[in-house]
């Protein structure tokens, strides 16, 4: 975890100057305000194929504090980040994807009344204002990838229910906030606590009859990630956009975004396992290597499942440019660029192939921002003659995890990390 990027005084000035506007500024029914922009009709199928669409096939819309993003659904709000915003390690706040589970989300948050409550099996129940969190606790920063569990779900075959994301249900930010362990120390976690439950302000009907009207997630109190979590009040040196969790968001480095609670308002120390809908049956994966199984075994009730929080995000890499939208001249050098990351630690190596994985060449790595951040990479490629080329990229992390060239299948549509490919057409230079 990096040293904080601001002093307490600077943070108070930053949030004092802009937080009020965010607190009282309304989305005014963001779903209704979202304005579709015209797009060319394209096929509704995005994968798996040799060259699927990088993003999902959906219209572009604009929401408050956001550039045009790709809308999967408006109730709940699900917005995908377009490919071009992944050209740098840190994703602009306005381009950060949005994923809610329930349809009743905050339109405004009044900082004069909002509080973070710490309760349950603790020595001292506490309530903090945002100003108190900033003034009374030493800030810390971490660069970490926020990736939806279902990112790239459109690649699954057979298809599975859920948002048919392309590759854009992910973003990377520099998060600054309070260490979770400092908050827990102040409250005093009592013996007998087995899990920490987190809840924000979003709520709604959820799946009918499932008791899922509030979104809550829990982590084992013994999980080492607890020591790395922060409660973030800024992302990329700015207050969080409302649609990304203002005023406070739980950051769980290396884990999927389902645990990154937005609008965090309650932390509870539980003495029993959390069995709310969003822990079971939702967000569970097969207890198998890579979390993969078969439809037949699921139908036969042969598959034991565990919470997706039992694993970290698998190693992944992506080609961002060239994107295949135009020809490349033969004999001229091309900068092939992209990003890579792993929930298990630092990206140690990225390799690129220009012949569909038959041969691999080392790419150069960009600036290291931390073990859970995007790592940019670049490979200088000179195609020798005209024709079609299939570029591929694979990453290896510091634990020795190598990106595989086989997909996975599970009923939730989680954990996809197959090697990505991009078809490039090379033409004559003359």
Image (cartoon, rainbow, N blue to C red):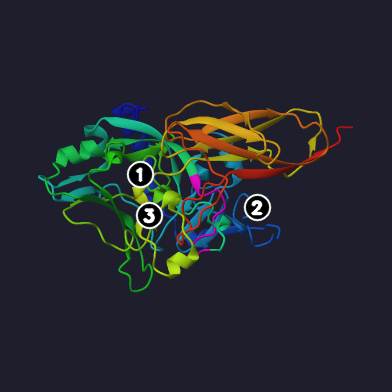
Q: Position of residue 75 (x, y in %)?
A: 46, 64
The residue labelled by disc 2 is 52
- Residue at (67, 58) in percent of width and height: 38
Q: Picture quarter containing residue 216?
A: bottom left
* Disc number lying in front (1 or 3): 3
Dot 3, crowdedness within 10 Å: few (<14), some or many (≥20)?
some
Q: Which mark is residue 287?
A: 3
Task: Tell me the element at label 2.
Answer: loop
Determine the CA span between mark 1 and mark 3.
Answer: 46 Å
Between 141 and 323, the residue placed more toward the observer is 323
Q: From this viewpoint, is residue 200 visible? A: yes
Q: Position of residue 404 (x, y in %)?
A: 54, 43
Q: Is residue 67 left or right of residue 355?
A: left
Determine the CA span between mark 2 and mark 1.
Answer: 43 Å
Instruction: Using the image, determine if residue 115 lies above or below residue 237.
Output: below
Task: Tell me the element at label 3.
Answer: loop
Q: Quadrant of the C terminus?
A: top right
Q: Position of residue 147 (x, y in %)?
A: 46, 46
Q: From this viewpoint, is residue 267 visible? A: no
Instruction: Using the image, determine if residue 155 lies above or below residue 301.
Output: above
The residue labelled by disc 1 is 20
* Disc number lying in front (2 or 1): 2
Of the residues under marks 1 and 3, which one precedes in the sequence?
A: 1
* Disc number lying in front (3 or 2): 3
Of the residues under marks 2 and 1, which one precedes in the sequence?
A: 1
Q: Quadrant of the N terminus?
A: top left
Between 39 and 396, the residue placed more toward the observer is 396
Q: Position of residue 70 (x, y in %)?
A: 57, 54
Q: Which residues are magenta?
A: 160-170
Task: Tell me the element at label 1.
Answer: helix
Dot 2, crowdedness within 10 Å: few (<14), some or many (≥20)?
some
């Amino acid at each position: 975890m990096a040293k904080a990027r601001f002093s307490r005084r600077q943070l108070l000035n930053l949030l004092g100057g802009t937080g009020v506007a965010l607190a009282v500024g309304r989305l005014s029914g963001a779903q209704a305000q979202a304005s579709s922009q015209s797009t060319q009709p394209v096929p509704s199928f995005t994968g798996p194929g040799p060259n699927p669409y990088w993003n999902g096939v959906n219209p572009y819309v604009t929401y408050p504090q956001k550039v045009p993003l790709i809308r999967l659904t408006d109730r709940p709000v699900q917005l995908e980040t377009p490919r071009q915003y992944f050209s740098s390690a840190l994703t602009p706040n306005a381009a950060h994807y949005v994923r809610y589970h329930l349809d009743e989300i905050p339109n405004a948050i009044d900082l004069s009344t909002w509080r973070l409550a710490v309760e349950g099996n603790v020595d001292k129940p506490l309530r903090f204002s945002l100003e108190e969190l900033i003034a009374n606790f030493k800030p810390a920063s971490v660069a970490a990838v926020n990736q939806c569990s279902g990112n790239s779900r459109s690649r699954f075959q057979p298809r599975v229910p859920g948002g048919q994301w392309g590759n854009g249900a992910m973003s990377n930010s520099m998060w600054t906030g309070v260490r979770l362990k400092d908050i827990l120390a102040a409250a005093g976690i009592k013996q007998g606590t087995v899990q920490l439950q987190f809840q924000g302000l979003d709520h709604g009907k959820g799946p009918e009859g499932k008791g899922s009207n509030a979104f809550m997630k829990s982590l084992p109190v013994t999980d080492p990630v607890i020591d790395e979590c922060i409660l973030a009040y800024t992302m990329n040196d700015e207050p969080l956009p409302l649609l990304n969790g203002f005023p406070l968001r739980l950051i769980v480095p290396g884990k999927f975004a389902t645990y990154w609670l937005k609008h965090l308002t309650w932390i509870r120390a539980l003495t029993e396992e959390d069995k709310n809908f969003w822990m079971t049956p939702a967000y569970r994966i097969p207890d198998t290597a890579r979390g993969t199984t078969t439809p037949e075994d699921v139908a036969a009730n042969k598959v034991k499942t565990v919470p997706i929080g039992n694993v970290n995000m698998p190693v992944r890499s992506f080609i961002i440019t060239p994107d295949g939208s135009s020809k490349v001249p033969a004999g001229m050098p091309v900068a092939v660029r992209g990003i890579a990351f792993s929930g298990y630690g630092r990206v140690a190596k990225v390799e690129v192939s220009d012949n569909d994985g038959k041969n691999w060449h080392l790419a150069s790595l960009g600036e290291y921002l931390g073990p859970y951040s995007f790592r940019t990479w670049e490979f200088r490629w000179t195609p020798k003659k005209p024709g079609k080329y299939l570029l591929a990229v694979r990453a290896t992390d510091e634990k020795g995890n190598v990106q595989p060239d086989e997909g996975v299948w599970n009923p939730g549509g989680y954990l996809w990390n197959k090697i990505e490919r991009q078809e490039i057409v090379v033409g004559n230079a003359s």
